[in-house]
Each structure stands twice: as C-alpha cells, then as structure tokens.
Image (spheres, rainbow, N blue to C red):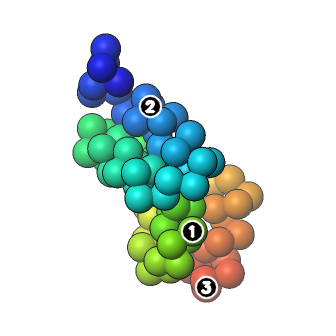
Amino acid sequence: IEIAPGNADMYVDRGRARLAKGNVEAAIGDFDRAIRHDPNHANAHTQRARAHEKLQQDAEALADYEKAHELGDTSEAVTAKLKAAGKL
C-alpha cells in the first residue's frame, strides 16, 4: 500500500486479511478505501458486504451485495444472498 497507495486491490487484500483475523472495522475501512479508489471494484463491495454481515449490519450488507452484482459479481454466494433477500 505504501508503494502504490492508489491500488484498490491492495486495500481489498489487506481488508480480507483483517477480516479473517476478526478486525472487522479495520477491514471495512480498507474496503471503503478500495471503493474510493475504484468505485467499480466488485470484489471490494462483496468483501465489504461480508464484513457488514459480521457486524449484523444487514441493510449495508445487502446494498453492497446488490452493487457487487450490478458490477458483475455473479458468484453463487452473491446470487444466493440476493435471492434470499428477494432481490433476484
């Protein structure tokens, strides 16, 4: 991140590591930064949705899943979340 602070992928990677370690708020901060650098980064939205789920922030999670899907994340996991919420 220090070498390429504008690289959204690096923020997503660090956010995923933080999320895996249970540092959810810091992970959301990284996903937010990734999205600021690249608003069309579908994986950043998907990962932030997962973090919001861990905090039981269902509305925020659903909004991120919807955006991720709109941006091209048609993975089984995202599709299942949207179907369960009646969005597909």
Residue 37, x across and y down, in percent: 27, 38
Which residue is located at x 49 percent, y 67 percent? Answer: 52
Out of 17 and 53, give the one closest to the viewer.
17
Alpha carbons under labels 1 and 3: distance apart: 21 Å
Q: Secondary structure at mark 1?
A: helix
The quarter of the image holding the N terminus is: top left
Residue beneath label 1, please? 54
Q: Is residue 82 left or right of residue 12?
A: right
Sequence-earlier tag: 1 or 2: 2
Q: How would you rate the neighbour count of disc 2 (Cα within 10 Å): few for under 14, some for 14-19, many for 20 or more?
A: some
For badge 2, the amino acid type reads Asp
The vertical placement of 83 against 49, above or below, is: below
Real-space CA distance between mark 1 and mark 2, rounded to the nearest whole angstrom: 22 Å
Q: Which residue lies under the disc numbered 3?
A: 86
| Circle number at residue 9 | 2
Relative image position of residue 34 (x, y in whole percent):
35, 41
User: Residue at the spot x=47%, y=77% of the render?
Assistant: 57
Residue type at the position of mark 3: Gly
**Could one spot residue 62 in this view of the protein?**
no
Identify the element where label 3 is drawn: loop
Residue 26, which numbered label? none
Alpha carbon separation for disc pair 3 and 2: 30 Å
Q: Position of residue 26 (x, y in %)?
A: 40, 51
Q: Is residue 33 visible?
A: yes
Q: Secondary structure at mark 2?
A: helix
